[in-house]
Image: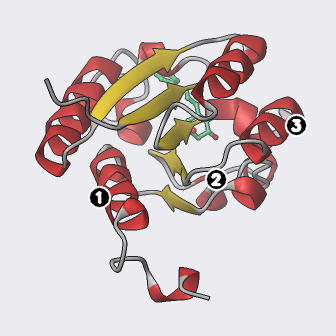
């Protein structure tokens, strides 16, 4: 049996409510829909997806700790934690593989308190404002970031 490398996908607070409110900002798809799309994209690229949603910062930090040395990459939509949760920043800084930050909306086009990301400084890259498609793009980014000889030029240094 082949064991596929695992991408840990983390979803922060309130993202469990996707599809139920504010569809004009976050779309009509549920979090389960996004995870299913990521699993399909990941399987096609030879990865497995492990997903965890939590409304508690400590649970997300624990999940990042468990990923160290075990998961190939982390894709994280930290939700509102992304704007102030330095514990998540510090945990991600201890992770050796690529970290892709995803936001469904474009926080930079919204209220000023959403303009700061404490995850961005420890992320390999950020995808924002592209709706749910950003999640699938994040899987493609992980594929490229983990493929020898297929890394974006800015990371070849
Ligand atoms: O655009 C994103 O993905 C966000 O990470 C979503 C967060 C927000 O605080 C960030 O600034 C940007 C909020 C997620 C809340 O999700 C809801 C889902 C359904 C209804 C209401 C909120």
Q: What residue is disc 3 on?
A: 86
Relative to 144, is 67 above or below?
above
Task: Assign a secondary structure to mark 3.
Answer: helix
Occupied quadrant, residue 151: bottom left
**CA distance separating discs 3 and 2:** 21 Å
In the rendered image, is residue 133 in sight?
Answer: yes
Looking at the image, tell me whether mark 3 or mark 1 is earlier in sequence order.
3
Indicate left or right for 5 with 82 as reference: left
- Image quarter where the C terminus lies is bottom right
Task: Assign a secondary structure to mark 2.
Answer: loop
For the residues carrying marks 3 and 1, which lies nearer the camera in this image?
Answer: 1
Relative to the observer, which residue lies in front, 129 or 139?
Answer: 139
Tell me if the residue at label 3 has its CB under 8 Å from ligand 1. no
- Residue 15 placed where, x, y %? 49, 22
- Image quarter where the N terminus lies is top left
Residue count near mark 2 (Cα–Cα under 10 Å), binned few <14, some 14–19, many ≥20:
few
| Residue name at image x 48 percent, y 48 percent | 105
**CA distance separating discs 3 and 1:** 27 Å
| Residue name at image x 77 percent, y 42 percent | 94
Q: What residue is disc 2 on?
A: 110
**CA distance separating discs 1 and 2:** 27 Å
Figure disc tally: 3
In the rendered image, is residue 29 in sight?
Answer: no
Occupied quadrant, residue 9: top left
Tell me if the residue at label 2 has its CB under 8 Å from ligand 1. yes
Q: Please tell me the numbered disc located at residue 140.
A: 1
Occupied quadrant, residue 13: top right
Relative to the observer, which residue lies in front, 28 or 102?
Answer: 102
- Residue 117 placed where, x, y %? 75, 51
């Amino acid at each position: 049996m082949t064991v596929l490398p695992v991408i840990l996908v983390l979803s922060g607070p309130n993202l469990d409510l996707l599809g139920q409110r504010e569809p004009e900002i976050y779309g009509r798809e549920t979090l389960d829909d996004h995870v299913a799309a990521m699993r399909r994209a990941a399987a096609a690229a030879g990865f497995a997806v492990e997903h965890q949603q939590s409304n508690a910062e400590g649970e997300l930090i624990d999940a990042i700790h468990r990923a160290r040395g075990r998961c190939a990459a982390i894709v994280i939509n930290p939700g509102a934690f992304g704007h102030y949760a330095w514990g998540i920043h510090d945990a991600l800084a201890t992770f050796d593989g690529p970290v892709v930050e995803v936001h469904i909306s474009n926080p930079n086009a919204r209220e000023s308190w959403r303009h700061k990301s404490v995850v961005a400084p420890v992320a390999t890259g950020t995808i924002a404002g592209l709706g749910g498609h950003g999640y699938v793009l994040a899987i493609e980014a992980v594929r490229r970031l983990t493929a020898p000889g297929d890394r974006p030029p800015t990371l070849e240094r």
